[in-house]
Image (cartoon, helix red, strand yellow):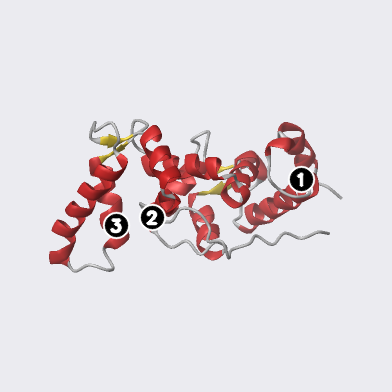
Amino acid sequence: MRFDWAEETLTQLNLPSFHFAVQKSEIECLLRLFNSLVKRNGQRLDKNGLDHGAFRGILHNVFGMTDDVLLDRVFFAFDKDCDNRINANEWVKGLSVFLRGTFEEKLKFCFEVYYLDGDGSISREVVFDMLKHSLHQHLSEEESGEGIKELVEITMKKMDYDNDGKISFTDFERAVKGDPLLLEVFGPCLPTAQVQLQVPTA
């Protein structure tokens, strides 16, 4: 039997905009999974769902994501209403792009994750911080400062097409379309190709 809240949520969702193969049944499965995860974390559905810690746990345990900074940024990219919880709508809509989005949708998602706390562009300082964080395990203390500064300069020359000292979405889109490997240049914020979300069919 379908939960009443799931029925209500389904009526609010724009099903044709999602990428799940059997859209309605798969979305119902995602909603049941969401309900299970919310209850497992001791929350009620009327409290708007998964909190920051619970969602980070899912990203880590299900999708194998381990970067603390990017885990936070992905959470806030999902949390469209900025209430510090992932509700059912945000859960399904976010996973649609996260798992099966088009290249253009994933491009927009990655950019949103990277510029999240900025003004709609990625500043030189943010580029430095993200590269430093993602590379700190591979560089010594002495190497990290100068080495990352050099990487920042290379990155800005490659991606800052209008030379204004920051990377706009237009810059990012142009760079990634020219070289798709740049999609996650500042750190992994999407599941690997091998990760598949298994949802029950019953």
Disc 1 marks a residue whose amino acid type is Gln
Foreground residue, 175 or 23?
Answer: 175
- The residue singled out by tag 1 in the image is 23
Foreground residue, 90 or 167?
Answer: 167
User: Is 177 positioned to the left or the right of 125 in the image?
Assistant: right
- The residue singled out by tag 3 in the image is 133
Residue 148 position (above or below residue 77):
below
Disc 2 marks a residue whose amino acid type is Gly
Which residue is located at x 55 percent, y 58 percent? 58
Q: CA distance from mark 2 to mark 1?
A: 30 Å
Q: Position of residue 137 (x, y in %)?
A: 28, 68
Number of the label disc, if any, that sits on residue 106:
none
Q: Position of residue 185 (x, y in %)?
A: 37, 52
Q: CA distance from mark 1 to mark 3?
A: 38 Å
Local crowd at mark 2 within 10 Å, few (<14), some, or many (≥20)? Answer: some
N-terminal label among 2 and 3:
3
Asked if the residues shown at circle 2 and circle 3 are in contact, with their CB atoms under 8 angstroms apart, the answer is yes
Q: In the picture, residue 176 is in which quadrant?
A: top left
Q: In the picture, residue 12 is in which quadrant?
A: top right
